[in-house]
Amino acid sequence: MCCPIQGLNPGNWQEIYRSSKPVSDGVLFAGFDTTKLNEGDYIVKLVVIDNDGTKSQDRALIKVNNFEITAIGDNLNYIKGKVKVKGKIYLTPSQGYPVGGTYGMSSVEEYKVEYKNQQGSWITLCHKSNYLPLNDELCTIDVSSFPNGLYEFRLSILVDDKEWKFDEPFKAVVVQELTDGWPVEFDGFYRGPHKVADFSGSKGKITMVPYHVDCFQNVCWGSKLVFIESNGKYNSLSYLNDGTLISGIDNMSVIYFDKNLKESLIGTIDYRDRGDIKIFNKGGVVKHKMDLSSIPPNFSPLVLSHITALDTDQDGRLEFYTYFIDDSTGQIRIYGFDESGRLLDKFKISIERKNKNFDGFLLLKQMIFLKQGNDYNLAPIVGDFNYATDTWGIHLDLYLDI
């Protein structure tokens, strides 16, 4: 016997087969035709009656999946306008014949793709007769007139020209304002602020995010960087051309446009063994490198900080600034470099910990750049925090080099 599942309780039982013959090779019934059932989950029940009339029974859960919609459109089932509906019609080779990589059913006369409207009725969007799908493409539908929202779609087939059978509903979201090529999905976990920049040579903006990341607060490291273009296409970068592994650098660093090189560059810190400051393009080519050996050995790059890139002379030549911390005293200093890697003798700002009753600094990760006429200043913003009372920013200090 067989019946569809309705919650935890089966519906009306329908007898499939009855016999008093001995079971051969463990096969109870060889002619169970699932094409006569709609798609979905069912319970099959075996009832055995012995010579004394005593009944024993067993049950099994099966899933009928002879045909299905696998995708609508190319953007994770977020759709607009005209989109292709992809799906499969399955059957074993002995019952059908392969068509375009999909096993077509010789008993299938027609199929159609439908959607459920707001009144709960199923409306046909496309209908095919004497045709089996090639390359999993069932048909193209037009949802241009659909209001934004979540919709249910289904694939229906006519078996042996007798009765329509229905697939389980497939859900897709209509977003008429959706940008072509989006949303984008790739493996990995990401949290914290992403970086968006207009990279030279790209059409529109590019989003840069770490891939397979390990995060501490808002600083994230990943095994590679992923660059996603405005059309949804993306490529990844695992190494810089000098051999630096992406997993060892600050993936959330500054992106800026270099007027002289006429391309967007990424400024980052290689934290391993005190490392270097490196400026590279999205192809991984290092354009500038700052050796940190000129920094006092007791100072290390502050892990939670980012690089600030400035053109203080307005001549297209950039300077790069970031925080360093004294590993023994906790004092914070700002050091800067020019594009050649030379240590700069300006913006000498040292930040001392004032409130000894608090646990540490609350530091704005990227400095503020202030300009007034021909005068320029860097302005780090620093506060205190206390773990015990969960009190943040009791006071904020603005440091200026004047």
Image (cartoon, rainbow, N blue to C red):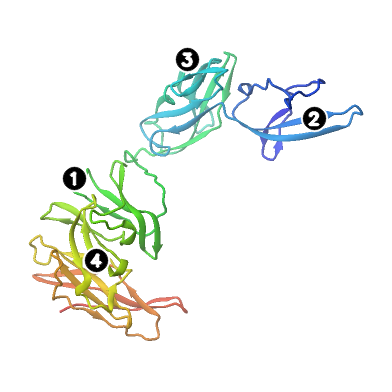
| In contact (CB < 8 Å): disc 4 and disc 2 | no
Question: Mark 4 falls on what kind of element?
Answer: strand
* Residue 129: mark in rendering: 3
Question: Mark 3 falls on what kind of element?
Answer: strand
Residue position for label 1: 201
Q: CA distance from mark 3 to mark 2?
A: 41 Å
Q: CA distance from mark 2 to mark 1?
A: 70 Å
Left or right of 366? Residue 62 is right
Left or right of 217? Residue 206 is left
Q: CA distance from mark 3 to mark 1?
A: 47 Å
In this orientation, does residue 116 appear? Answer: no
Residue type at mark 1? Gly
Q: Residue 312: x, y in percent? A: 12, 67
In this orientation, does residue 360 appear? Answer: yes
Residue position for label 2: 47
Indicate which disc, 2 or 1, sits on the residue closer to the N terminus: 2
Residue type at mark 2? Val
Residue position for label 4: 276
Question: Mark 1 falls on what kind of element?
Answer: loop
Left or right of 17? Residue 386 is left
Count the labels in the image: 4
Q: CA distance from mark 4 to mark 3?
A: 66 Å
Residue type at mark 3? Ser
Indicate which disc, 3 or 2, sits on the residue closer to the N terminus: 2
For discs 1 and 4, the disc positioned in front in the rendered view: 4
> With respect to residue 74, does 89 lie above or below?
above
Indicate which disc, 4 or 3, sits on the residue closer to the N terminus: 3
| In contact (CB < 8 Å): disc 1 and disc 4 | no
Few, some or many residues within 10 Å of mark 2 (<14, 14–19, 20+): few
Q: CA distance from mark 4 to mark 2?
A: 75 Å
Identify the residue shown where x is 14% and y is 75%.
346
For discs 3 and 2, the disc positioned in front in the rendered view: 2
